Image (spheres, rainbow, N blue to C red):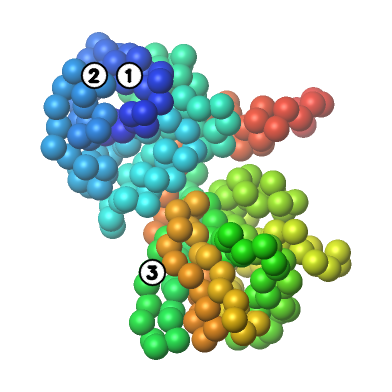
Amino acid sequence: MIGLHAHAEKPAAAEVVRAMVQELDLAGLPYELDASTAPLAGKSSSLDIADLAGRCELLVIMGGDGTILRAVQKMRDAIPTVFGINIGTLGFLTCLGSGEVQRAVECIRNRDYIVSPRNLMQADLVEKDGASRNFFALNDVVASRGERSQLVQIRVGLDDLPLTDYNADGLIVSTPTGSTAYSISAGGPILMPDCGCFVITPICPHVLSIRSVVMSDASVIKMQVAKPGQTVTVSVDSQSCGQLGIGDLLVLKKSPRVLPLAMLPERPFTEVIRQKLKWTGSNI
């Protein structure tokens, strides 16, 4: 079963969804849509994205990277293979563009795609009274000053050993998938999807010697506010999830959850970044 989900508010979404439905019908492939996507094709559905993900083997997401991020956040235990069709302007997670729907259905019908396993990061926000909340990130977890006008001081440790106190606007802890998102904008490195790493990238650090740090994703990263009277805002894949104050603890580690992301054999990650970042030079 193929699931269809789209960013319904994008102007081109209805056209792409209708084209997808038409091509799937012509190919004789079974599909279902979620409740927000079905009206774009003149259909109805009572399924939310989590229900749809639990029923399908392949989930076609039409939108951009943000659409995929939000969909993964809403999924429960079941995460099917995600095949992205880009309706936005910059997509590192999508296979094809909005004008390539016929090619997309051919790839799906013939299983002419490879699956790139993308590890998720687990974020445990532990309050000083012992209460905790758990979140999962495909891209990154950000601890930042929020609307404050002054730097925040964040103490970071790795595997119960101290690393440093960062004086900065905040910190980005990114998965390899998220290394081409906020982290790269803040000067962080690009990580290959299968490198098995996390990267900590400071946002506008006060000390110029502070740089991004890459560590194994087997590491456990612990963050605390180091300066009394300060709080930092914590967001997971751009969604605010709470605040960290004195005595609270943010623990980041590799999640057992994995996103199987479809990619085309002729468009490996190296080619994706060449195209998206407009790099020049020959292929090697």
The location of residue 64, given as percent across then percent down, is: 47, 33
The location of residue 284, given as percent across then percent down, is: 77, 31
- Lower position in the chain sequence, tag 3 or tag 1: 1
Q: Residue at x 70, y 68 (%)?
A: 151
Of 233 and 125, the residue lying toward us: 233
Mark 1 near mark 2, Cβ–Cβ under 8 Å? yes
Residue 46 in the image: above or below residue 112: below
Q: Residues within 10 Å of mark 2 (few under 14, many from 20)?
A: some
Quick check: can you spot residue 220? Answer: no
Residue type of the residue flagged with mark 3: Asn
The location of residue 3, given as percent across then percent down, is: 26, 34
Residue type of the residue flagged with mark 1: Ala
- The secondary structure type at the circle numbered 2 is helix
Residue that numbered label 2 is attached to: 41
Give the left or right position of residue 262, taking residue 205 as reference.
left
Q: Residues within 10 Å of mark 3 (few under 14, many from 20)?
A: few
Residue that numbered label 1 is attached to: 14
- Lower position in the chain sequence, tag 1 or tag 2: 1
Whole-angstrom CA distance, mark 2 to mark 3, is: 36 Å
- The secondary structure type at the circle numbered 1 is helix
Of 17 and 129, the residue lying toward us: 129
Circle number at residue 134: 3
Q: Residue at x 72, y 78 (%)?
A: 165
Give the left or right position of residue 186, taking residue 78 as reference.
right
Image-quadrant location for residue 5: top left
Residue 80 in the image: above or below residue 87: below
Q: Residue at x 50, y 59 (%)?
A: 235
Of 166 and 259, the residue lying toward us: 166
